Image: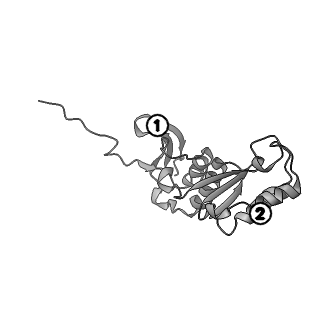
């Protein structure tokens, strides 16, 4: 008689919360202000404005855009704002920061809109491995929103999950 292999994970009540399922579709772009600075460090206003004026901003149509400076230049705040104003007619979303900051910002907008009541009193695993660049801030936020509902929260994969939270028994 053969022993039947049973997939305990598939038969469990464990709910998987996969942040990758919520990853906003769309092209991400990063604009590095340093390319418009003298030697990557010095902003000359007249030259900077001329460079922005000659830029084809339509290439960022319907994209998510992060504006940053890759050098240690001290860039006045208005420089990023001016770039954002140029992008505004084209981009879906504009932030000051890196692509990771951009993705975190997108998750910060969408995670509060999810109905977490479906996880009421259930063990939940926040899936850890993803093929998309899910930022750590998104995992922290997901745990924050799941905690009031979930009976327990784990992180990782079902076969090797790390326990993070267990609701206290009431009564």
Q: Is residue 78 left or right of residue 70?
A: right
The residue that disc 2 covers is 53
State whether residue 7 is above or below residue 113. Answer: above
Which residue of the protein is positioned furthest toward the left in this rendering? 1
Task: Identify the residue shown where x is 53% and y is 58%.
Answer: 24
Q: Position of residue 52 (x, y in %)?
A: 77, 60
For numbered disc 1, what is the local secondary structure?
loop
Which residue of the protein is positioned furthest toward the bottom in this rendering? 89
The residue that disc 1 covers is 161
Instruction: Report how far apart the C-alphas of labels 1 and 2 lie in the structure.
Output: 52 Å
Badge 2: residue crowd in 10 Å (few <14, some 14–19, many ≥20): few
Q: Nearer the viewer, residue 111 or 169?
A: 111
Which residue of the protein is positioned furthest toward the top in this rendering? 1
Q: Position of residue 6 (x, y in %)?
A: 25, 38
Task: Identify the residue shown where x is 44% and y is 39%.
Answer: 157
Mark closer to the chain start, 1 or 2 = 2
Badge 1: residue crowd in 10 Å (few <14, some 14–19, many ≥20): some
Q: Position of residue 73 (x, y in %)?
A: 83, 43
């Amino acid at each position: 008689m053969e022993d039947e292999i049973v997939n305990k994970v598939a038969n469990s009540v464990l709910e998987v919360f996969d942040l990758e399922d919520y990853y906003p579709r769309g092209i991400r772009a990063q604009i590095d202000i340093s390319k418009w600075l003298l030697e990557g460090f010095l902003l000359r206003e007249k030259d900077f404005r001329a460079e922005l004026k000659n830029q084809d901003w339509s290439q960022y149509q319907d994209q998510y855009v992060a504006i940053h400076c890759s050098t240690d230049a001290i860039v006045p705040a208005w420089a990023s704002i001016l770039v954002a104003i140029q992008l505004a007619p084209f981009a879906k979303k504009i932030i000051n920061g890196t692509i990771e900051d951009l993705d975190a910002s997108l998750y910060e907008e969408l995670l509060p809109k999810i109905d977490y009541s479906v996880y009421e009193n259930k063990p939940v695993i926040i899936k850890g491995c993803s093929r998309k660049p899910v930022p750590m801030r998104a995992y922290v936020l997901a745990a924050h929103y799941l905690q009031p509902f979930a009976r327990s929260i784990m992180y990782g994969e079902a076969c090797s999950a790390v326990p993070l939270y267990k609701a206290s028994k009431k009564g």
